[in-house]
Image: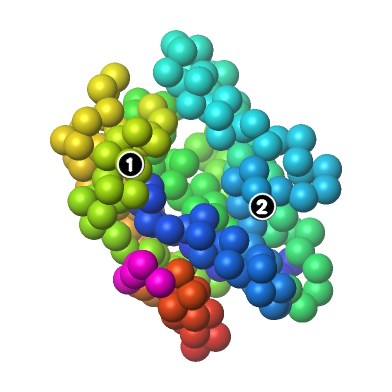
Amino acid sequence: MADFWVLLGTDYCGKSSVLADLTARAGRIEAVSYDPQLLSGDYRAIAGLPAALGKAYAGGQSRAYVMALLNIAVAYLHDRVVTAPPGRTPLVDSYYYKILVKCRLLGLDDGPWLPYWRSLPRPAGVVFLDVSPATAWQRSGAGAGLNPLEHYGPVADEDSFTRFQRDLRAGLLDEVSGLRVEHVPTVPDVTATVDHVLRTMKD
């Protein structure tokens, strides 16, 4: 299995834009995400997973069902890591870290999946995209684009979003505290952010 890195950050930190730019560059970095626009081949079968997760959580489905859907996401990311072509370095969107922390914050912290996720191979390093909750709120369209897994409670207002994102950031940094973590500030220029990510991984 090739070494791999994890691209991590709170919601609306710019991970999807960075991974899309890396995919367009067609370099040695293999962008790995279950964002629908980044799926290819047979993996397109899970394109509806993000929407299904939000609906299942908000719709009162059982915790076991929601956790099983989350495990599909983790299993997909892990599969892409272990099947990466020679000479390619996977850069994985959040891996299981973000899912694990969100489960804890939202009360989905039991069941058989958590020990399994923690048993998965550890990355060579983590690139952490830092963004303020205020900037993230603006990027969400002042809450218009939020799903139920991105804020506390049933109402998506700025306060519930900001509190959740602050706790999410703290939880993420706690989860990866034993790993090499490189912080990259996010800026409006996606190209500059991607260049910074690539330099970080090379160094």
Q: Is residue 135 left or right of residue 34?
A: left
Q: Position of residue 6 (x, y in %)?
A: 52, 62
Kindly identify which residue carries mark 1. 141
| Residue 8 seen in this snapshot | yes
| Magenta-colored segment: predominant secondary structure | loop
Q: Residue at x 61, y 69 (%)?
A: 22
Label 2: few (<14), some (14–19) or many (≥20) C-alpha neighbours in 10 Å: some
Asked which secondary structure carries label 1, the reply is loop
Q: Residue at x 49, y 75 (%)?
A: 191
Q: Amino acid at mark 2?
A: Leu
Label 2–label 1 contact, CB within 8 A: no
N-term-proximal mark, 2 vs 1: 2
Q: Is residue 64 left or right of residue 89?
A: left
| Alpha-carbon span between mark 2 and mark 1 | 22 Å
Q: Across the whole image, how many numbered discs are drawn on residues?
A: 2
User: Which segment did they paint magenta?
Assistant: 185-189
Task: Based on the picture, tell me whether residue 186 belongs to the magenta stretch.
Answer: yes
Q: Position of residue 193 (x, y in %)?
A: 43, 73
Q: Amino acid at mark 1?
A: Gly
Asked which secondary structure carries label 2, the reply is helix
Kindly identify which residue carries mark 2. 38
Q: Residue at x 44, y 47 (%)?
A: 98
Q: Residue at x 47, y 41 (%)?
A: 99
Q: How is the image coloured?
A: rainbow
